[in-house]
Image (spheres, helix red, strand yellow):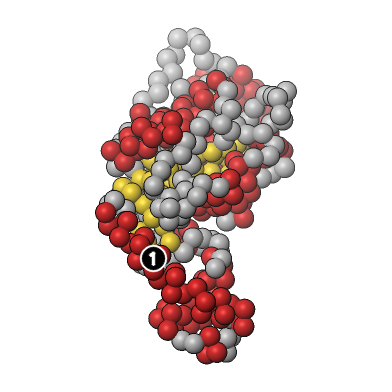
Amino acid sequence: MGCITARKIVSIVHDLEVVFLEKASVLKRISGIGDFAAGKIARNRQSALELAHQELEYCVRNEISFISFIDKGYPLQLQECEDAPLLLYYKGCPDFGNVKNISVVGTRNVTRYGSENCNKIVSQIAARHPEAVIISGLALGVDGIAHTAALKSGLKTWAVIGHGFKTIYPGEHYGLAADILEKNGAIITEYPHNSKIRPSNFVERNRIVAGLAKAVLVVESAKKGGAMITADLANQYNRDVFALPGAVDRMGGNGCNLLIKTHRAHLCEDVEDIEYITGWKPNAETKNCQSIEFPDDGRFSEQELLILEALKKEQYNDFDGLLTKTGLTTGQISTSLLELEFRGIIRSLPGKIFSLRKS
């Protein structure tokens, strides 16, 4: 049965044994089940129990854990999604209670630009949010780059696969999957071990990639594809969606620019954009604003130094706040901010918010 229908039935009967023990004539009288669902349950429940027993044996033999949506430890953020899987199988030790999960998705045909920026942003996340978890789909391209960048940076990473544990797809990432588990990450799926690999599976698994995360970053994508589906699902789930801006003349179109242009994603150049929208605060031990020094050697005017000192003390400042903290006039601040932004010292965020640009 579909996840949504099954969830509704469980919420109605409360006791799962009712589903497996009661006659169809009794089940169909339960509000919300009806003749069709009751007949389907009665016809298939014995074979379902036999398959479940086989799956349980396989999980025990292969050290696979599982958790259902009625269990206490089921991921809370995924629980919020109406179409969330009834059951998750996993290898490794995922902390489903972690609050800083970010999914990174994108095209298999990643460019050098996308690869470099994916590595950069993941390493920035690691430096400022070492407790974060990078989630992706173990596919070729952006997925593999994100997982690898997380491992190199010391972050945990989870791979959500579109098949059972009998195989790893693509085969090129068998070693990457092993590295993920070795470094305390996790491989997660909703599919039993003997499930066939179907293209539709990878579309379905995108809802888990989106649902497990607090935020989703699209690195590169055509205007249609799995990454765009994930972004749309994330918006439906009220997740923060970010997109790396790309070249306007990219072959096949630029899905990231389309997401930004249609207000389905926030523009993301580095980790500060993610922090600004999500409200994530950098780990106290990794904050580096205070260590930035701006020598009084003529490279900066007195007005610019006043602004830089204000930005050192507080990560984000709006225009009015800088007026108050520096004592400068509107014209002086406008001129200095424009010059500092032009030189790449500061960055402007939506809402006339300014912050130091970190290397």
Residue at numbered disc 1: 52
Expressed as whole percent of the image width and height from the top left, the position of residue 242 reads 58, 40
- Residue pictured at 42% horizontal, 84% vertical: 21
- Check disc 1 and report its element: helix, strand or loop: helix
Q: Is residue 339 above or below residue 282?
A: above
Whether residue 187 can be seen here: yes
Q: Amino acid type of disc 1?
A: Ala
Expressed as whole percent of the image width and height from the top left, the position of residue 119 reads 46, 27
Expressed as whole percent of the image width and height from the top left, the position of residue 248 reads 72, 25
The reply, left or right, for residue 292 in relation to residue 65 is right
The reply, left or right, for residue 326 in relation to residue 157 is right
Q: Is residue 163 above or below residue 268?
A: below
Q: Could you say which is closer to the camera, residue 46 or residue 169? A: 46
The N terminus lies in quadrant: bottom right
- Residue pictured at 57% horizontal, 35% vertical: 106
Q: For label 1, count other residues whose C-alpha is less than 10 Å away and answer few (under 14), some (14-19) or many (20+).
A: few
Quadrant in which residue 174 is drawn: top left
- Residue pictured at 29% horizontal, 38% vertical: 183
Quadrant in which residue 341 is drawn: top right
- Residue pictured at 47% horizontal, 48% vertical: 163
Q: Could you say which is closer to the camera, residue 240 or residue 76? A: 76
